[in-house]
Image (cartoon, grey):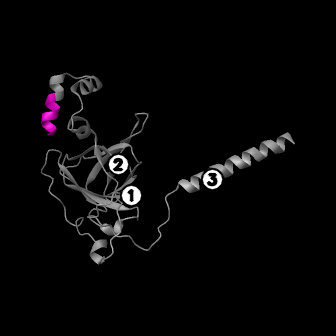
Amino acid sequence: MVVAGKLSVVVITVLIATISNYVSADPDMLQDICVADLNNVVKMNGFACKANFSASDFSFAGLAIPQPTNNTLGSIVNFADVTQIPGLNTLGVSMARLDFAPGGLNQPHTHQRSSEVLFVLYGELNAGFITTDNVLVSKTIKQGEIFTFPRGLVHFQINNGKGQAAAIAAFNSQYPGRQDIATSLFVATPPVPDSVLSKAFQISYQEVDAIKSKLT
């Protein structure tokens, strides 16, 4: 009887956990489409649906053409998320194109709402992410190869080749967001106190100011 009682407790616990996980999951769509009304003043977790839509709400040509990389980092990211393709609203997917000059860096950043799969169109990239145990997972990937970045982890790509490079990224979120580590810390508004940055990075106040001046 004791064994049976313990078994019942285990079964009930598993059932409660299963039901809890099911209830907390994202709800299924209740209509075929929900094209985002980007001008709606109603604030919600996503976007309200607009009444009238067209095929253009589901199309975007912005990833077809390489973008200029003549900036400080030598790279540029062009997102194709719900803000460019309103038809992605509620679908949980989006993409981006990344272009790199030789030596170009897509600086360390995170996507708090999405994992990422990167596919190299041409060129050669060193791609990596850092676990919460501060372990670097990194690999050189070439044309036609893929690298995956887990959700929320700091990651980067750098073009170590001698020519231009480009890649396509896929996300399991309509709006993955992006937080650049250096920019978030040194160019926040209002600013992060110099005392915090100085102590965290073990640098002087003058060095903090020098970094801020380069990022602004």
Q: Are marks 1 and 3 in contact (CB under 8 Å)?
A: no
Q: Is residue 155 found left or right of 150 in the rendered image?
A: left
Looking at numbered disc 2 in the image, what kind of residue is underneath it? His
Pick whichever of labels 3 and 2 is earlier in the sequence.
3
For residue 209, side relative to residue 47 (left or right): left
Marking on residue 173: 1
Image height of 150 relative to 46, above or below: above
Q: For the N terminus, which image quadrant?
A: top right
Picture layout, residue 106 above or below residue 89: above
Q: Quadrant of the C terminus?
A: top left
Three-letter amino acid code of the residue under disc 1: Ser
Pointer 2 or 1: first along the chain: 2
9 and 154: which is toward the camera = 9
Numbered disc 2: secondary structure:
loop
What are the residue bounds of the magenta stretch? Answer: 209-216
In the image, which disc is placed on residue 111? Answer: 2
